[in-house]
Image: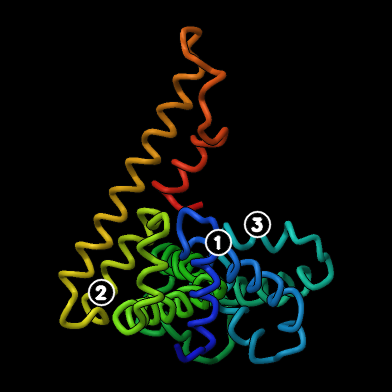
Amino acid sequence: MKETIYTIPLSESLEQDSECPFCYLENKLESEQIDYCLGPAMMEPDHRILSNPKGYCRRHMDQLAGAKRALPFALVLDTRMDEVIQTLEDARGTKKTGKKAGLFAKKEPGASCVAQAAAELTATCLVCERMEHTMSKFFYTFWYLYGKEPDFRRKVLSGKGFCLHHFKEVLNASEKHAGSRREEFLEELTSLELENLKRNKQEVHGFVKQFDYRSDKENWNGPKDAHLICAGKLSKF
């Protein structure tokens, strides 16, 4: 198997005892992006040119704050605030610059323009965009390896399937990347997914029964965090 920057992490993800290899990849990628935004990115003008207008979603702003790196985080906020204030002032039409107001040049300034500007300011996130780009490469590489590398395919089919979110993404990516054997591959992955969903169901049902005084608690050997495992399977977090 020819190794690339995408095949190596994918192969590593299958070696983990994980309910979803793509959740493993996504969590690792997200952590790397947060570290990057508060580290090397501070010295790169190109990054600030992108981060100022795009900003960060609530989830990633919270993670940036939680990283407890006060000065880099404050620098991010300082220049982002300039962008936010300028955009809202232009939308309202009170900033007298003598220049056209970009997106708002053809519209009457007022509440509707401000509302649109606020929506656009909160609709983008630099970390989300970078993660989506990289994850799309992982889904493409997954299908390339699944069709070309028997060992990779065996590892996938001996695993625990995917969370529902990433199962959907795998299926969607198959339309472009699975090739002529797509139906065969989808049947294999659907069987794998259902098998593991049923396992999750049994585990969480056994967990619930442990709260019944009539249950045989001593002989139950299911995971103590079965409810959290099941929740992760249904909705990645």
- The answer to whether residue 118 is above or below residue 138 is above
- What's the residue type where badge 2 is placed? Ser
Residue 97 pos. (x, y %) = 59, 88
Q: Is residue 156 left or right of residue 83?
A: left
Q: Residues within 10 Å of mark 2 (few under 14, many from 20)?
A: many
| CA separation in Å, label 1 and label 2 | 23 Å
Give the quadrant of the N terminus.
Answer: bottom left
Question: Considering depth in this image, is 102 or 140 the residue closer to the camera?
Answer: 140
Answer with mark 1 or mark 2, whichever residue precedes in sequence: 1
Identified at 43% across, 77% down, the residue is 138
Answer with mark 2 or mark 3, whichever residue precedes in sequence: 3
Which numbered mark, 1 or 2, is in the foreground of this view? 1
Q: Residues within 10 Å of mark 1 (few under 14, many from 20)?
A: few
Give the quarter of the image for residue 102.
bottom left
- The answer to whether residue 116 is above or below residue 9 is above
Residue 221 pos. (x, y %) = 53, 30
| CA separation in Å, label 2 and label 3 | 34 Å
Q: Secondary structure at mark 2?
A: helix
Which residue corresponds to mark 2?
174
Residue 111 pos. (x, y %) = 43, 62
| CA separation in Å, label 1 and label 3 | 27 Å
Which residue corresponds to mark 3?
62
Give the quarter of the image for residue 8.
bottom right
Answer with mark 1 or mark 3, whichever residue precedes in sequence: 1
Question: Considering depth in this image, is 27 or 191 the residue closer to the camera?
Answer: 191
> Can you name the residue that lies furthest to the top here?
214
Which residue corresponds to mark 1?
16
Badge 2 vs badge 3, beta-carbon distance below 8 Å: no
Q: Is residue 220 left or right of residue 164?
A: right
Identified at 25% across, 74% down, the residue is 174
